[in-house]
Amino acid sequence: MLELDKSKVNFLVTENMVGETKHILNDLTKEMDILLKIINDRKIENVFFVACGSPLCACQTSQMLFEKYSNIFCKAYSGMDFLSHSPFILNKRSLVIGISDSGTTQEVYESIELAREKNAMTIGITKNKKGNPLAEKSEFVIGYEADCIWEVHLLITYYLSLMLIKTKAHKEEVEKILEDMKKIPAILERLLSEVEEDSKKRGEIAAKYNMIYTVAAGPLLPLAYKEGIITMLEFTWTHGSCINASEFRHGPLEVVENGVPYVFFLGNDDSRKITQRTIDFVKKLNKDYMVFDINDYEKNLHPMLTPMILFVPLEFFYYYLSIYKNHNPDDRRYYGGLVKY
């Protein structure tokens, strides 16, 4: 196992997670309330998120809120897709939200430029409010000044989405999610003190595999892509694939056998039975699997908040998976301009 000082590993964002989530909920929501009034005044009819990588996965999760609880059209785009396959309905009644932690992701800020050409309202969400192209090109900017981008991006996009949904149709479910969001920092704080050792053991087991299939459904599917593709490939240099449990029996089940590893994310929403059915099938034929079940970590929270909770044990899991492979998750060979793309 690689010996590292965890406090100096950029990949691991657990150290300031609690304080950063409190900052979003206590401070930035006031700023977002001002933006929400402007959104309402502009009579926004549709919403587009534009991002790449992990931020895109957060946006795809928030898109599900619109789909499940409102009649407001919403779609999350990867930046290149937004530029090359722009939505026909993009106009002055559109809200385009671009997210980039650095604010320098070219296809994201160029998407904002395109949106402004179509007279859409634009919001840039980035770490710093000034000094980056996304902030400069967006009509409005939210600067979160935090490092735990998965939690931060989910909290910001959830709040904007849910509050916008509330203006169109008052729903008890929406109020429940907003109320439960206030509990997130305390739950994260508890988990940070409880789950590391178990995730470390799982990471040691998983480190022997050259590739892993990650399986999930419902609101956990974007998180499964984030971890099973982005984290696995970029940070641990382990081959991986993400499978929607709803589609598992339509092809993927044919490769199930001992020695083929699976990691399942199991939520407590209506999709739980879908993923559980897949787990039950794999268990009959294969011993190489593990399950991250939300009910092992938190049972008294709205199911749509599960992606924020499972992130904690998963963050430790992939960190230890990487260092048990003797790989520093901060190391890169190509990414970030090391090799021209």
Image: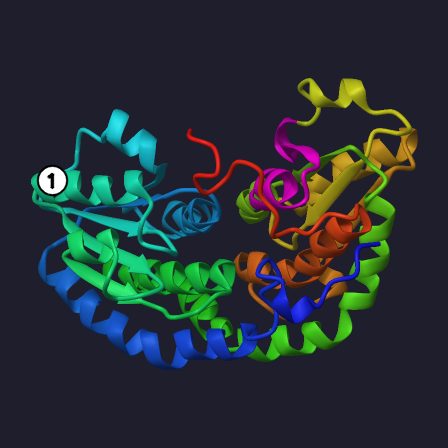
330 relative to 124 in the view: left or right: right
Residue 98 visible: yes
According to the picture, the residue beneath numbered tag 1 turns out to be: 91
| Residue type for callout 1 | Asn
* Quadrant location, the C terminus: top left
| Quarter residue 67 falls in | top left
Residue at x 78% of width, y 59% of height: 199
Residue at x 45% of width, y 43% of height: 336
Indicate whether residue 228 is drawn in magenta.
yes
239 relative to 197 in the view: left or right: left
Residue 120 vs residue 171, the one in the foreground = 120
Q: Give the range drawn in magenta.
A: 226-247
> In the picture shown, does residue 32 fall above or below 131?
below
| Quarter residue 73 falls in | top left
Indicate whether residue 143 is drawn in magenta.
no
- Tally the marks: 1
Residue 85 visible: no
Rendered location of residue 84, percent (x, y): 26, 25
Query: How many residues crowd mark 1 within 10 Å: few (<14), some (14–19), many (20+)?
Result: some
* Quadrant location, the N terminus: bottom right
Residue at x 47% of width, y 69% of height: 176
| Quarter residue 278 falls in | top right
Residue at x 13% of width, y 46% of height: 120
Q: What colour scheme was applied to this rendering of the protein?
A: rainbow
